[in-house]
Amino acid sequence: MDTYLETERLALRPFTADDAGLLIELDSDPAVMRFLSGGRPTAPETVREQHLPRIRAGYEKWAGRFGVFAAYEKEGGAFIGWFLLRPEPDGPLDEAELGYRLRQSAWGRGYGTEGSRGLLDKAFGELGLRRVWAETMALNHRSRSIMEKLGMTFARALPTPEDMLMVEGADQGGVRYEITAEQWRAG
């Protein structure tokens, strides 16, 4: 499978039809899902029948330029999670969302920052984007820390979506951080 992006320690590649087990395992960890579903796992059939087909369809929709990418350690080849860089479904192609979901074993090792930095380099270089944003729950300090390390700045508070009202900190809502191409180059 073709590599989408390489950093010093990581390789990102498109998900294949055979990767459902990786996503099911990742989404079954209560700590990983804490700020997404209140710790409840994603049903395996939802991953197989909805999430993975939608991820794979995105590669075609955006001709491989954007999507959700499986992340592996270059040394040893361990799957550590995924990163995403993609525009809104019907949004402009010069703006994209940055996101990540990592296994607990990858936490605290700098992978979130490293993979995201690589995606921002690609976004503002090769892909010619003008803005990238990321969103998380207000209480998700680890994710917010990554955004801040990348030079992203707080843009606005977000209301908690209806399907996330059971998540810890739902009463505090979410946050959106952004960075422009100019800010990235100046940083």
Image: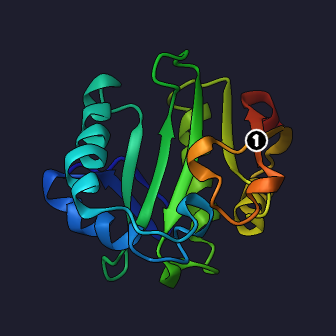
Q: Position of residue 175 (x, y in %)?
A: 78, 46
Q: How is the image coloured?
A: rainbow
Residue drawn where x is 53% and y is 61% of the image: 37
Secondary structure of the residue carrying tag 1 is strand
Left or right: 168 as drawn, with respect to 3: right
Residue 86, placed above or below residue 149: above
| 61 up-or-down from 5: above or below | above
Kindly tell me whether residue 118 is visible in this rendering: no
Q: Which residue matches tag 1? A: 176
* Residue at the spot 85% in from the left edge and 43% down from the top edge: 153
- Which of the pair 129/156 is nearer the observer? 156
Q: Residues within 10 Å of mark 1 (few under 14, many from 20)?
A: some
Q: Does residue 122 appear to the left or right of 156 in the view shown?
A: left
Picture mark count: 1
Amino acid type at circle 1 is Arg
Vertical order, 25 against 16 (above or below): below
**Whole-percent x and y of residue 150?**
74, 53
The answer to whether residue 43 is left or right of residue 53 is right
Q: Nearer the viewer, residue 86 or 118?
A: 86
* Residue at 42% from the left image edge and 34% from the top image edge: 66
Q: Position of residue 160 (x, y in %)?
A: 70, 45
Q: Is residue 15 visible?
A: yes
Quadrant in the picture for the C terminus = top right
Q: Give the image quarter of residue 113.
A: bottom right
Residue at the limit of the structure toward the left, as seen here: 18
Residue 170 in the image, given as x and y percentages of width and height: 73, 56
